[in-house]
Image (cartoon, grey):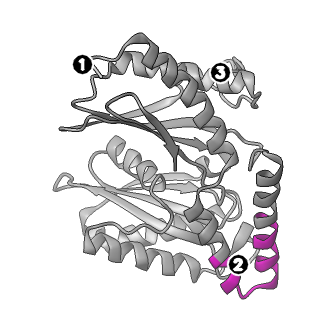
Amino acid sequence: MERGWPLEQYEAVTEAVAHLYVKALKDLPPDVRAALEAARSRESSGVGRTILQTIERNIAIADEQSLLICQDTGTPVYFVEVGEESGCNPIRLERAIREGTERATREHPLRSSVVSPISRQNRQTNTGYRVPVIHWEFVAGSPNVEILVIPKGSGSENMSYFRMLLPADGVAGVKRFVVESVVGSGGNPCPPVIVGVGLGGSADLCMLLAKKAIARPCGSINPDPEVAGLEQELLEAINQSGLGPMGLGGATTALAVHVEHAATHISQNPVAVNIQCWAARRGRLTIGPEGEMAIGY
């Protein structure tokens, strides 16, 4: 492909994003399906096991009848990686992502969940001022563009938490805050959940890291051994709470805990929690150097 995408490429992206958004709402990633199956097989609570079986039946019906996994289409959140050598114009790409989201909502059709925070007016497009939410990252030397969509449901997003802990609180304070946040959420975020934790950075970066953490494949391990150890400790502590599926008791409150971190100020200890429901929906569009496209998870 020549340096700089032709206009037809952005039109193709619009069409692909429309398909990507609907696919993400219907097709649960294999890693999440496997985690739910494993949770059901080890669940000791009869009620919890029945709930997990019902969740699996929900997924099977969605597969068989090409239905949405959940009626909440959520807030469309995109993580976009633009390769340095891709020739992509981010302004035009952002427009294509917005138009693709609108097209999917109108043509499928999907329930529109996005409204003005003041008037509560709904444009019926799942878009609005500064929505879809798009987070950008630019990758040195790469010829590719990658678009990851997370339709983030309200039940789990409402259970979001942030606190500026003291450095003296240390890791023990972080653990206490995360566990209390998840257990205090009860059944509201539709457990079993994926818990995203952000550590460090500034207040805004910390919250973004928590959201980025839930975008990882379920059960993936942070490459930093210390952070990976914290993930495992938090997962064990949360599941020992006994909150269980849908908050009705059981051994599986969380399918996974993912932690993302950044350096921070010497006088700060920020921690954020972003919870993802069992329907951990996501979809990924990869655009190669010749304009070729592939959709996955």
Q: Is residue 164 above or below residue 35?
A: above
According to the image, label 1 marks what residue? Answer: 3
Q: Quadrant of the N terminus?
A: top left
Q: Is residue 199 left or right of residue 156?
A: left
Residue 59: x %, y % from top left: 75, 58
Asked if labels 3 and 1 touch by Cβ distance under 8 angstroms, the answer is no
According to the image, label 3 marks what residue? Answer: 103
Amino acid at pointer 1: Arg
Task: Name which residue lies at 50% across and 81% down.
Answer: 236
The magenta region covers 38-55
Amino acid at pointer 3: Arg
Instruction: Point out the tag, 3 or 2, that comes first from the N-terminus.
Output: 2
Farthest top residue?
7
Give yes or no for residue 48 being in the magenta stretch. yes
Q: Residues within 10 Å of mark 2 (few under 14, many from 20)?
A: many
Given this view, does label 3 or label 2 mark the residue nearer the observer? 3
Q: How crowded is mark 3: few (under 14 residues within 10 Å), some or many (20 or more)?
A: many
Secondary structure at badge 1 equals: loop
Residue 174: x %, y % from top left: 37, 67
Amino acid at pointer 2: Arg
According to the image, label 2 marks what residue? Answer: 40
Task: Name which residue lies at 37% across and 16% down.
Answer: 91
